[in-house]
């Protein structure tokens, strides 16, 4: 369920680092907790996002939740699919429904994130 | 699961939208056992019930239920409730879970009649079966002829061979029944209802769908549209206030408010711009702060974003352009007639 090559945050974001690019999304656990997602608000390309700071929001039928940047960097691409099909985030949160790609400004920050095993243990303990 | 007034309640089972559609199109079942019950017995039970509530109790027929308000003397809501006449000397009140102790103390403190007030929350579980197939579903489980129970009437009978109070009431804007049973029987009846409704595609429904359904139907939720600081006249609930029935708690304050006209009024709205106006968000009229949102949500049936807000009374008519501050951005909306959704009869 939770890919081994991703790293995870306590706020339920994931990041896949390839070279100096990080692809960011929210976890399957997050989409389950949120329920039916109706809006996804993402930053503009070129915006600098910082580890732990809000980079946008996800709105479900019942509530709005911030998305926090798992790593710092400059936004290079946003997933345009989500503007018209936010429900994809419920269907494929680890794949097709990634949120943004960033150019990492501090790659060493990845040390602060959890592995898949650690994340699974974390959400297990949270329940 | 979320904590709801001390009860562990599921917000959703299969998903709010999925559950919502099941109720509009077929049937859904809600465990609303958290709702409170208060019983009033005695020769002057009706006099006490009439004194503490806004709608008329004296002309209820046995087996009839009525939506009503429980008010403070200043005219604000203690709670909104359903009053059922079980017998001339016995009234059964269904009240909101988080208000039940407060309601009980309130009614008891006003009891200067020959009547006894009992806190009965622990004696009843409540299952709400709602939707166009609700009657077909429940009818399989009871010898009571459900078609003979008129809307907002109830019958004491049996469901799954257990004693049950079957009320033709609901909080979804669909046809349906609210069934009061002993807690020990509730689990079994829940499972039997799910089996009986399987052929119609019944879904168990949580608090999330309960909220979207009641909002579309234009029904108030305590703590949102109504609370201790709002009156029935402000909330558009004039119809539950019977000034001509004689003295009742809150009557003087409401009469004064009625003479002057309430300064603010509840209004329904639809979003025009992108976003959802949610509880507590500020409402602007002509660019200036004018009110606040009490409830807001996507409407799965109408495919729009809808909600309620309080506005100055003169601004609260339908068709008024307003803006709602959504995360520091003003977003266009317009006031509309409510209910947002009305079932075809």
Image: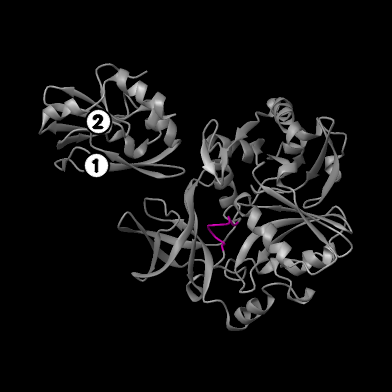
Q: Is residue B170 left or right of residue B320?
A: right
Residue B18 at x, y = what percent? 54, 34
Residue located beneath label 2 in the image: A24
Q: Dot 1: within a 10 Å radius of its alpha carbon, few (fewer than 14), some, or many (20 or more) residues?
A: many
Mark 2 in CB contact with mark 1 (< 8 angstroms): yes
Residue B149 at x, y = what percent? 83, 46
Q: Chain of mark 2?
A: A
* Front-lying residue, B72 or B160: B72
The range drawn in magenta is: B220-227
Which residue is depicted at the point 69% across and 48% down? B170
Q: Chain of mark 1?
A: A
Q: Is residue A16 left or right of residue B236?
A: left
Q: Dot 2: within a 10 Å radius of its alpha carbon, few (fewer than 14), some, or many (20 or more) residues?
A: many
Residue located beneath label 1 in the image: A55
* Front-lying residue, B253 or A75: B253
Residue B319's place in the image compared with B173, above or below, is: below
The disc at residue B60 is none
Label 2 residue SS: strand
Q: Quadrant of residue B284?
A: bottom left
Which residue is depicted at the point 67% across and 41% down? B33
Which residue is depicted at the point 85% across and 45% down? B155
Residue A47 at x, y = what percent? 15, 43
Secondary structure, magenta segment, majority class:
loop
């Amino acid at each position: 369920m939770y890919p081994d090559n991703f790293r995870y945050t306590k706020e339920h974001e994931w990041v896949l680092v390839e070279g100096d690019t990080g692809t960011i999304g929210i976890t399957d656990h997050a989409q389950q907790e949120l329920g039916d997602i109706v809006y996804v608000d993402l930053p503009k390309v070129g915006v600098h996002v910082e580890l732990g700071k809000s980079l946008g929001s996800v709105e479900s039928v019942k509530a709005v939740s911030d998305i926090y940047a798992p790593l710092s960097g400059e936004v290079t691409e946003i997933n345009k699919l989500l503007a018209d099909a936010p429900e994809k985030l419920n269907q494929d949160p680890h794949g097709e429904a990634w949120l943004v790609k960033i150019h990492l400004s501090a790659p060493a920050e990845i040390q602060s994130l959890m592995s898949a095993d650690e994340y699974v243990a974390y959400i297990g303990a949270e329940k | 699961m979320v904590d709801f007034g001390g009860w562990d309640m599921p917000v959703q089972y299969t998903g709010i939208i999925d559950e919502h559609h099941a109720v509009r199109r077929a049937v859904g079942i809600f465990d609303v056992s958290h709702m409170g019950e208060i019983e009033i017995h005695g020769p002057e039970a009706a006099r006490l019930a009439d004194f503490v509530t806004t709608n008329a109790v004296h002309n209820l027929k046995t087996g009839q239920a009525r939506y009503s308000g429980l008010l403070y003397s200043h005219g604000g809501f203690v709670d909104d409730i359903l009053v059922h006449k079980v017998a001339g000397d016995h009234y059964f009140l269904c009240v909101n879970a988080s208000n039940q102790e407060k309601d009980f103390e309130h009614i008891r403190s006003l009891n200067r009649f020959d009547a006894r007030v009992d806190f009965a929350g622990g004696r009843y579980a409540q299952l709400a079966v709602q939707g166009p197939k609700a009657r077909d579903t429940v009818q399989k489980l009871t010898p009571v002829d459900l078609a003979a129970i008129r809307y907002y009437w109830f019958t004491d009978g049996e469901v799954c061979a257990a004693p049950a109070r079957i009320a033709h009431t609901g909080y979804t804007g669909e046809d349906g029944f609210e069934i009061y049973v002993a807690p020990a029987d509730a689990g079994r009846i829940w499972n039997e209802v799910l089996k009986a409704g399987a052929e119609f595609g019944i879904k168990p429904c949580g608090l999330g769908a309960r909220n979207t359904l009641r909002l579309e139907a234009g029904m108030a939720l305590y703590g949102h549209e109504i609370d201790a600081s709002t009156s029935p006249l402000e909330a558009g609930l004039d119809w539950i206030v019977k000034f001509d029935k004689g003295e009742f708690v809150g009557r003087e304050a409401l009469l004064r408010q009625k003479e002057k006209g309430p300064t603010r009024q509840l209004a329904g709205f639809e979003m025009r711009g992108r976003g959802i106006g949610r509880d507590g968000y500020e409402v602007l009229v002509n660019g200036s702060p004018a009110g606040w949102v009490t409830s807001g949500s996507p409407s799965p049936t109408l495919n729009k974003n809808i909600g309620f807000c309080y506005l100055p009374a003169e601004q609260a008519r339908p068709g008024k352009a307003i803006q709602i501050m959504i995360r520091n951005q003003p977003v266009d909306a317009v006031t509309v007639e409510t209910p947002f959704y009305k079932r075809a009869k």
